[in-house]
Image (spheres, coloured by chain):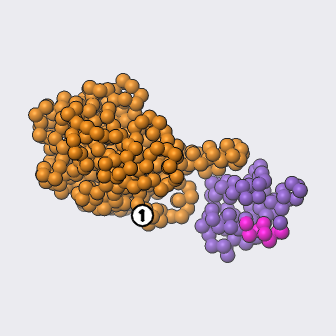
Amino acid sequence: MTRVVITGMGALTPIGNSVSEFEAGLLASKVGFQPITHFDASETGITLAGELHDFDPLKRLGKKDLRRMDAFSQYAMYAASEAVEQAGIDETNTEPESMGVIYGSGIGGLTTIQEQVIKMHDKGPQRVSPMFVPTSISNMASGNIAIRYHAKNICTTIVTACASGTNAIGEAFRQIKEGRAQVMLTGGSEASVNEIGIAGFAALSTLSKATDPKKASLPFDAGRLGFVMGEGAGTLVLESLEHAQKRGANILAEIVGYGATSDAYHMTSPDPEGTQAARAMQLAIDEAGIKPADVDYINAHGTATMGNDSAESKAINTVFGQDSDVLVSSTKSMTGHLLGAAGAIEAVATVGALQTGKLPENVGVVNQDPECQVNLVNDANRDHETEYAISNSFGFGGHNAVLAFRKWAD
Amino acid sequence: MTNDEIFSKVQAIIVDQTGEDAEKVTMTTNIKQDLDADSLDIFEVINEIEDEFDIKIETEEGIETVSDLVTFVEKQLADKE
């Protein structure tokens, strides 16, 4: 059976604009929230977001790219550039037809859609920009990545709301495992911190109205308030072990399992019993050929909404047992919720935990909810050599996606 | 609006869209061939010109050089008056 390894990673997040900055931020329990600057949010009822800080797209993109890409594509391209650079993939060592792209985004070019709808309303339909469609459609992160890196195998996009990044990586993993591609560029991107994005999620009462960044995103706390929206992207270069070893690539970690299920329950609420979330975890663990007790760390979906965190905790306990010592943290306590990019940056965080033996903490919890009976990562237990870890993502629509990772060892 | 004024506005739009230096964009410049612009660049330049001058350009056919654009804008503006 083909083994699938990670040979490159890129991250663009509210707590760091590269993998090394992001991982340093996680280890420092850095919280990336500030009052929204992208627009005047004073009438939205929402104060904080996890915006990117000091982001200079021109470090990795051209001026023309900026004009031709919505922010979500720019973020994807930026993170892809870092990942491809680290992997050292190019046309001398990789056949274009054996390299594909599966990328995720929850919404796509929402800022562009908003701008152009306003323009159509104000100036008439004949003034809509010719760039509107090519910049805003949610497959264009994938399309632009394939164009830039000449990836001529499958190129597709996963849209499963907040599970998009994890589903994308899982489906990319499958492409290699089943022998259809040798290399896959995969991940997720989101840029929805704008008027309509914040207003839309606020209308669902899913967003934290907190004004204090330290008390805004509190996954698994009894007083959790909802999520803080973040933005950014994460990219992984996946490769068959054979292809990676043949070209002498540096291997960062292995993906050993992927589980995907559907709640088939409700548009926005998770099944409170977490039955299918549990089954997704079990499927990933089964595919890895291990037992739940072999898993040391769970990077939780942990959005800090009332519904998610209790259902996810139940699901974890269903799979791992009430007395399990598996450690759990939600890095959304630091980054906020990057929606379709969440699973991608959380994959990067999980790989970092495997590499360093230091788990990211579940920051900010003061009063753990009795409905969330899981062992949270804290200052005391964070140093933990980990061989197997899983990363959970769940999306509106009832999408459950779980990846299982293994610390690299030949 | 004088011919020169129209040119400098059109020039600025093309420079902004294509990222070329202003000196490279003269009246005789062929937009596609000399500036390495693709179909999306042309669409976008036309859209920006429509916004800037509040005119409607129905087709990009027959527009090859900067001069073609300036002449077209001049005529449309004259028709409006």
**Where in the figure is residue A187, as x and y percent of width and height?**
37, 48
Identify whether A369 is placed above or below A19: above
Q: Residue furthest top?
A: A265
The residue lying at 46 percent from left, 62 percent from top is A57
User: In the image, is A398 to the left or to the right of B63?
Assistant: left
Q: Nearer the viewer, residue A62 or A359?
A: A359
Q: Is residue A161 one of those drawn in magenta?
A: no
Q: Give the residue at x 34% y 47%.
A: A216
Which type of secondary structure does the marked residue at label 1 adopt? Answer: loop
Q: Residue at x 37, y 35 (%)?
A: A395
Q: Is residue A61 above or below residue A145?
A: below
Which hue belongs to chain A?
A: orange
Main secondary structure found in the magenta portion: helix
Q: Residues within 10 Å of mark 1 (few under 14, many from 20)?
A: few
Q: Please identify the quarter of the rendering in which residue A322 is found.
A: top left
- Residue A211 appears left or right of A250: right
Magenta region, residue range: B2-9
**Chain for colour purple:** B
Residue B29 locus on image (x, y percent) = 72, 69
Disc 1 target residue: A54
Q: Mark 1 falls within which chain?
A: A
Residue under the image location 25 percent in, 55 percent down: A29
Q: Is residue A352 visible?
A: yes
Residue A32 drawn at (x, y percent): 35, 55
Is residue A137 shown left or right of residue A271?
right
Q: Quadrant of the N terminus of chain A?
A: top left
Q: Amino acid at mark 1?
A: Asp
